[in-house]
Structures are given as structure tokens and as C-alpha cells.
Amino acid sequence: MLYWKQVTCAVCGTESQQGGIASTSSFGPPNLDLREDFVRRGVMNAWIQECPGCRFVANDLSNATAAEAEVRHETGFAEAGRIEGMPELAVRFIRRAYVEERAGQLSTAMRRLLNAAWVLDDFELDASAIRMRAANLVVSLGAAADIGQQLQRLDLLRRAGALTEVVNVADEMLSGELHPDHRKIIATQRRLAVEKRTEAVSLKEVWDSEG
Ligand SMILES: [Zn+2]
């Protein structure tokens, strides 16, 4: 459920009306990339606030660390996501990813880029480049990447059309010790890549599939 509230930007002090979400309950079954059926643009809009004064972006504008506020002055911040035809909401997520990447928060930056990709999906725009960037952030995490993030990387690569890489990464993962559920997801991603399927696939399809 969406609602509006007055928020004061922690960076520049500008007050603005921002949307929030009163309930976090979910409704539909998630896809392999964890997007749920109910997640539509209106809801995603409330996940990230943009200050009309200084263009800073955050989940909650009233909270910003000094390091985050500093990033706002960088040219890279102003330019992040500024690609022709990029929807405004996607720009916000990409800018927030930039802030988090600069602040060393690679896990959250990865999720922001995934959110930006969902926005592009909704507009039926090509999200391959954004997904590749998100997949590369998982690589940057190295040993700090948990199994959930490693599974996400496979889905990001597949959705971005990097199918050979999916097969290679999947084979490497499958050669190690894995929880049976994770093994099934990886094997399914590998099969989908071989079948050249790059669309969103529901977890239900994974559980319903053989082997
Ligand atoms: Zn501001």
C-alpha cells in the first residue's frame, strides 16, 4: 500500500513529498531474479526517493552518511544513468547504485541495478547492459558473494544473453558441494541457457521441472 509523507533531505535540507510503502507483504510467486508479480512501477517508485533540490537519491532521503553526500558532487554521479531514452525511475536506481558502489556497498548496488533492469523490462527496453553491470558486481564481491548472489549472477547473465558464460559458470558451480535446491536452480539456468531462453522464468517452473 502506497502513502505519501513529507521528507527532509539530509544532504541539502530541501523538503519534499515522497511515496512510501505501508506493507511489505507479497502476492505473486517470484521469478528467478526474485521479482514478484505484484512489483510494478508504482511500487518501485516508492523504493527510491529523489530530492528535487540536490538530486540526491536514497531509500529514505532523511538518512544519508557524509560519504554518500560527498558522492553527489562527483561527475560520475551526475552522469550515472544519463543515457538517451532511459526512464527517470531507472536513472534514480542507477544513480543510487553509483552512490553505493562508491561507498563500497556492492551488494545493495547490485540490487539497485537489478531494480533498474526491472524498470527497463516494464518499458520493454533492452536491460542487457545494466544486467551485465550487476553481474560484474557479484564478481567484484568475490568470496563475499553469498550463494543467493551467485545464483542471481547466473540469472543476470542469462537475461543479458551471455549464455556461454552461464554454462561455464554453472558447470564450475555444479562441480562443488551444493544444497539440492541450489543445485536444481543452477542446473535449470544451465538448461535454459542451452535452450537460448533469455526471458524471465518463475521459480515455480524451476521446481516443476525434471532433474
Ligand atoms: Zn537534497
Image (cartoon, rainbow, N blue to C red):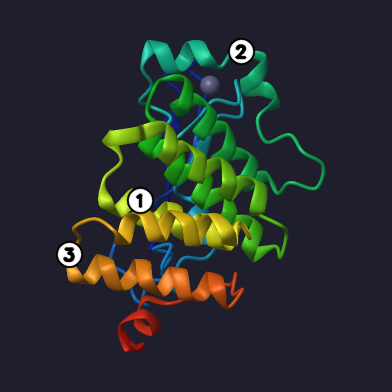
Res. 82 image quadrant:
top right
Inter-mark Cα distance, 1 to 2: 30 Å
Q: Is residue 59 visible?
A: no
Q: Secondary structure at mark 1?
A: helix
Mark 2 / mark 3, whichever is N-terminal: 2
Identified at 40% across, 84% down, the residue is 205
Could you tell me the amino acid type at mark 1?
Gln
Of marks 1 and 2, the one in the foreground: 1
Q: Secondary structure at mark 3?
A: loop
Horizontal and vertical percent position of residue 102: 47, 20
Count of marks placed on residues? 3
Marks 1 and 2 close (CB-CB < 8 Å): no
Horizontal and vertical percent position of residue 208: 33, 89
Mark 3 / mark 1, whichever is N-terminal: 1
Res. 178 image quadrant:
bottom left
The residue that label 1 is drawn on is 150
Identified at 67% across, 36% down, the residue is 81
